[in-house]
Image: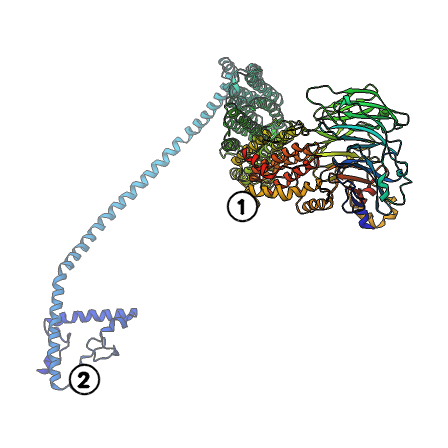
Amino acid sequence: MHTRLAGPPGGLRIAGRSDGERGPGEPEGQARALTPQTAETDAIRFLVGTQSLKYDNQIHIIDFDDENNIINKNVLLHQVGEIWHISTSPADRGVLATCYNKPSDSKVLTCAAVWRMPKELEPGSHESPDDSSSTAHSLELLCHLDDTAHGSTACVTWEPTGDGKKVISLADNHILLWDLQESSGQAVLASSASLEGKGQLKFTSGRWSPHHAGTQVATASDTTVRGWDTRSMSQIYCIENAHGQLVRDLDFNPNKQYYLASCGDDCKVKFWDTRNVTEPVKTLEEHSHWVWSIRYNHSHDQLVLTGSSDSRVILSNMVSISSEPFGHLVDDDDLSDQEERRPEEKSQEPPRDGVIATYEEHEDSVYAADWSSADPWLFASLSYDGRLVINRVPRALKYHILL
Amino acid sequence: MAAGAAGPGPGSGPGDSPEGPEAEAPERRRKAHGMLKLYYGLSEGETAGRPPGSDPLDPTDLNGAHFDPEVYLDKLRRECPLAQLMDSETDMVRQIRALDSDMQTLVYENYNKFISATDTIRKMKNDFRKMEDEMDRLATNMAVITDFSARISATLQDRHERITKLAGVHALLRKLQFLFELPSCLTKCVELGAYGQAVRYQGRARAVLQQYQHLPSFRAIQDDCQVITARLAQQLRQRFREGGSGAPEQAECVELLLALGEPAEELCAEFLEHARGRLEAELRSLEAELGPSPPAPDVLEFTDHGGSGFVGGLCQVASAYQELFAAQGPAGAEKLAAFARELGGRYFALVERRLAQEQGSGDNSLLVRALDRFHRRLRAPGALLAAAGLAEAATEIVERVARERLGHHLQGLRAAFLGCLTDVRQALAAPRLAGKEGPGLAELLANVASSILSHIKASLAAVHLFTAKEVSFSNKPYFRGEFCSQGVREGLIVGFIRSMCQTAQSFCDSPGEKGGATPPALLLLLSRLCLDYETATISYILTLTDEQFLVQDQSPVTPVSALCAEARETARRLLTHYVKVQGLVISQMLRKSVETRDWLSTLEPRNVRAVMKRVVEDTTAIDVQVGLLYEEGVRKAQSSDSSKRTFSVYSSSRQQGRYAPSYTPSAPMDTNLLSNIQKLFSERIDVFSPVEFNKVSVLTGIIKISLKTLLECVRLRTFGRFGLQQVQVDCHFLQLYLWRFVADEELVHLLLDEVVASAALRCPDPVPMEPSVVEVICERG
């Protein structure tokens, strides 16, 4: 019992050599795309997209049974190409968007499309009698978010609080706002803007802010982070040289509307107040290589998850700049069921900013890490060699935050 | 006749023979002697000549006192044979003859003496008779003299009394005359300005006049005197007020006035008032020297002026005051102290202003000498006016100045350090313009180190002046303790080393991460400098300081080890930053080269791409640069394999193991297993890991960063067949040249393997080039 709580609940190889339940001809390969199923709030479910140039690519639906500590996997075929980015609709559990490379002889073009997964794979129906047969499922294409004039799509991000009708895609130097109509069957380009400047400007990543009634989007391009107003598609703020090198990812603090975290090739993680962009609020330098992914915990914004190509996942505690009251002393009266732990906890100081845990299960670069949408204490990380690891926030810290 | 010959004793008869008395004389003498000796108890010693045991009363003893010739003869006759008798007889005769002759000689010899003695006695008898007569005459004369003397005394008695009386009257009259002449005398004195004399006269007369003031004539005199005295006092005051005439004269005036019985309190206040006027004038002149824009004389001159003018004046005032108003008691002393405190405070303010102007200058010796004089001068009034606390205040000022000097020197050292850095930057920039490589980093480092060290030593020497023995304030507790330990050691030396480390570290945090506003060579140089500090310089400097300043203070000081740790940390950070910066430069080249190329439609590789050659060139340049400052370091022991062998390993078994099965779908499981097992056995590569202080470690760090970048960039691209082959060629080329720089060449293999394997994964049509062809292309360059 104890080890289960403290240790990682499980690891899974997407290209699994270990489980051996793959059917014949099933592709194996690399993976960089990971997302929780945003609209799902009961089951712990992650979607992983594979990258293979030679075989049909797949979307693996990973269900984690918390009670029994069992990982369950379903596979959807994604035949149009290798998946670079994946995101799910916040409103409809069955809808997701991918950015994929269209195979072609002379040119690589990354496109984006919105898909619907088969009904039976939606939660509640995943206990199909045989898992092996479920690999045959394939996605239903809803619409393309393509406009070949705009170039390769790097990222698709959904309006976080909306009804799943608004999507922004970043294509080269364009930021495109789409309206999905007719139950996502059709995408209409609502408005767009583009970066102007010398050199080849390309967006690398973007996130839609959960605050301001969904009117703000932040994008990363080269070393700059920019904020956009989706109504006018104009720039709100611009953090020049946010990182010494390329900015890889960013995320909004779910509880503090002006706070933004970014990470990049300078191995740093920076926290920004968008009202004052001259200086970062805080800088972390824990990774020893490029940081590819950063995510705030959805409920406890002091918990920040980062994945890096040094093959490590780091969980940091940024309590001093979180919405939690800083320096708050735990009231121990409520810990009645924790009698035996009390003296130990009492002696602990209130948590400081810093690393909570470093997870070294991965053997290759970790390009994606994200929190579960259902369980705020659970997160998954995905390395290039296809290994997915699901971990929990250390229990002591969890209780410390809760109580 | 035998009897006649033998029998006769020496004194047997007067007519016996002429020898009789002569022979008897010694015998008599001896007898007399014997009796004397007997009397004095010396018999034993004297009788030593006699046979021991002989009885002195023996009548038969010829020499005995009780000799009886009859008995002796009887005895002889009875006892001795004839022959012996005959012998005795002859012997005795012979003896008698000898004795006789002796006696005769004695009588002849002393005859003259007897005669002269008789004459003398006779003459004496005559003289005494004469003398008696003279004495009688003398006695008569004396009686006559006595008689006369008595008669004269009686006659003169009367006159003597009269003379005494007359002398008394004369003295009295002289005094009276003085009194009567006093007013005119005083007037005259006043007119002549002989105030001292006037006051003395007045003082002498005052008591008398006071006593006899009931007599009208005296009364008149007294009145006159008082008038004159009043006038005198007024004149004195006038003179006193006019000031001008210098402190001693004023003191004299005050003294006279006091003697005239003027109220001391008032005089005291007035005296101080005047002194204040004078001292304020001094202060004003000092202030003028300060000026708003000082054409100021140097600080030494200024303190000299202050010392001789103001402090000297204050001393005079104080000593005169204490002399004059000693009777005033503690209240008077308190007044003086307050006075001194106030003026002293103003003086200190001026001095401090002047000293503040000195802060910028570099010359400590002048300042210390000035301070020394300032402090020394104030010890005199300090002793006089302990209550005013001038000495303490002066010491405080000196201490403050000393502290400020320390601060100034710290600033100076910092500035010197920054100056050195600027010089280094220029030196680093200059040769590049001249088109020369290798700006002599080791030389620059030596320059910087020696320049800083000499600055430190100069500063130490400069502040050491404050504690020199001959300086008057050096034995104050502050300068013995706190100044040395907290001030010099902690504040100056430790402070500087810390700030040096901080300045150096700030280069690591500089925002110019992109291009590196700081030239990498500077980072390298600073890192080496800090490392040198850690290993030797810090302990040297601190030992030097401790020796020079004999730190006695017990307050805690920063241990050498803490400073060394700081310096080492700085060195480490700088070197790590250097690795990052250089790694970034190469990374950017590699990244551009991967990102900007169209890998799908590239042609079959014929050459190694130019960028790879550039990477090798740059790495070699970095190697040279680091080699100038850092030791080689340890490589992981490897078999002495050439790049040839590694190539074969790399390009055949391993590489194929990684990607070949990807296009031979027959055994997908095995390949994955193989790659995973490989990973299992290879250690995780920490890309931006801390570096050690040696060349190999630095180069390893840079190459790791570069190759990891290459790997990540390759994974983001899609390659055509020839694209993959180009990567293969490039990687082999890198492999050929980079292995020699790193600690563990396995590392380079591993990373390059990963690159090629990743490129193969990103290639829809992975057909690798023949290893031999790759080799040929690489060898062709």
What secondary structure is found at the residue carrying circle 2? helix
- Point out the tag, 2 or 1, that comes first from the N-terminus: 2
Vertical position of residue A302 compared to residue B319: above or below: below
Residue B680 location (% of width, % of height): 69, 47
Q: Is residue B559 left or right of residue B94?
A: right
Packing grade of label 1 (10 A; few <14, some 14-19, many >=20) is few
Of A90 and B626, which appears nearest the observer? A90
- In the rendering, which numbered label is found on residue B75? 2
Residue A123 picture quarter: top right
Chain letter belonging to callout 2: B
Could you tell me the amino acid type at mark 2?
Lys
Could you tell me the amino acid type at mark 1?
Ser
Task: Check the image and name the residue furthest to the left.
Answer: B1
Chain letter belonging to callout 1: B
Residue B196 location (% of width, % of height): 51, 20
Residue A129 location (% of width, % of height): 90, 45
Vertical position of residue B517 compared to residue B17: above or below: above
Q: Residue at point 64% right, 43% down?
A: B654
Of B392 and B649, which appears nearest the observer? B649
Task: Check the image and name the residue furthest to the top.
Answer: B191
Of B399 and A55, which appears nearest the observer? A55
Q: Which residue is mark 1?
A: B640
Residue B226 location (% of width, % of height): 58, 17
Q: CA distance from mark 2 to mark 1?
A: 150 Å
| Res B26 visible | yes
